[in-house]
Image (spheres, rainbow, N blue to C red):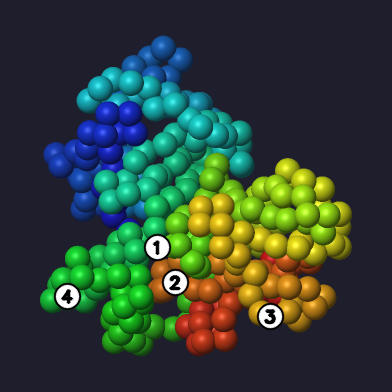
Amino acid sequence: MIPLKLKCPVCSKSLMDKEKIINGKPSVKLNIDIQGKEGHIWLSSIYGDYKYETDIEIPDDAIVRFFCPVCGDELKAENKCDICSAPMIPLNLEEGGRVRFCSRKGCTNHVIEFKNPEIALKLLYDTYSLDNKINKNEINYKNIEKVLQKQLNKKEAEREVIKNGTFLYPYCPQCKHTLIKDNMIELEIVNKNDEKGLLQLSPYLNIFNHKSTINLPEGEPVKEIHCPHCNESIIINENCPICNSKVAHILVTSSLKLVEFKFCSKSGCKWHGIDKKDEQTIILEDSDEW
């Protein structure tokens, strides 16, 4: 699991409490308000760990308000939890990017967004490295994959299974900018009538939620798909093995490496897959559908 360093999205001051240790790491300290009753909470800084400590009782299913203990401002949500509809509380990563977690007690929904894959992979290097002989400042997203795989090979790692529902951190294969916006993968598209719009796809493996700002009839391929940041096409010279439509590709991070992730450009076709070279180390659970 990855230890994170977090800061306030309002004042940019560190939220790390070195005096309150949870699972061997400094915790994340926040002020809280529950129906007018004020207190403090210390969250585990390890991503994927739901342990916390608090000095006031939090009723089951209660929605908690969170405040920065430094500037006192409320940490206001930009969007809702897609599981229980409670506000998703944002915290900034010191390395660049953002974490969002559900404000309802009992809901474990949380999302991490990195600005670029190099930051994500450097954090993974911190987690998996067997020694510290390599200068991390000289590592980039191209060679860190080799470093990680070498370390994992020493442990005789088995093929990794990316399970259904896993949040796939997506990046443009050209400019390497994150494609996440409001907890969705956002892409620019052109339909057969040359109308331009936005397409939002679920970033969770085998969760097929999507929406578009232009008309996309079921069974109709899009004419083009672009990155909204660099405007480069992500359509590649490959056809879907199911319906023969054009295939698009993005980059996603697993716990091992950056993976070239492919999906069909036709509305309604659920084919998706990864590159053949990545299948040696990674398996997508129920990989015959996207």
Q: Are marks 2 and 1 in contact (CB under 8 Å)?
A: yes
Q: Inspect the image, locate mark 2, and give the three-letter code of the amino acid beneath it.
A: Leu
Q: Is residue 278 above or below residue 38?
A: below
Q: Nearer the viewer, residue 159 or 225?
A: 225
Q: Residues within 10 Å of mark 2 (few under 14, many from 20)?
A: many
Q: Point out which mark residue 258 bears.
A: 2
Q: Are marks 4 and 2 in contact (CB under 8 Å)?
A: no
- CA gap between label 4 and label 3 equals 38 Å
Query: What SS does tag 4 mark?
Result: loop
Q: Earlier in the sequence, mark 3 or mark 2?
A: 3
Q: Nearer the viewer, residue 232 or 128?
A: 232
Task: Look at mark 3 in the image and give the residue it sits on.
Answer: 238
- CA gap between label 4 and label 2 equals 20 Å
Q: Quadrant of the C terminus?
A: bottom right
**The image quarter in which residue 285 lies:** bottom right
Q: Which residue is at a point 29% across and 55% down the rendered structure image?
A: 3
Q: Inspect the image, locate mark 4, and give the three-letter code of the amino acid beneath it.
A: Ile
Query: What SS does tag 1 mark?
Result: helix
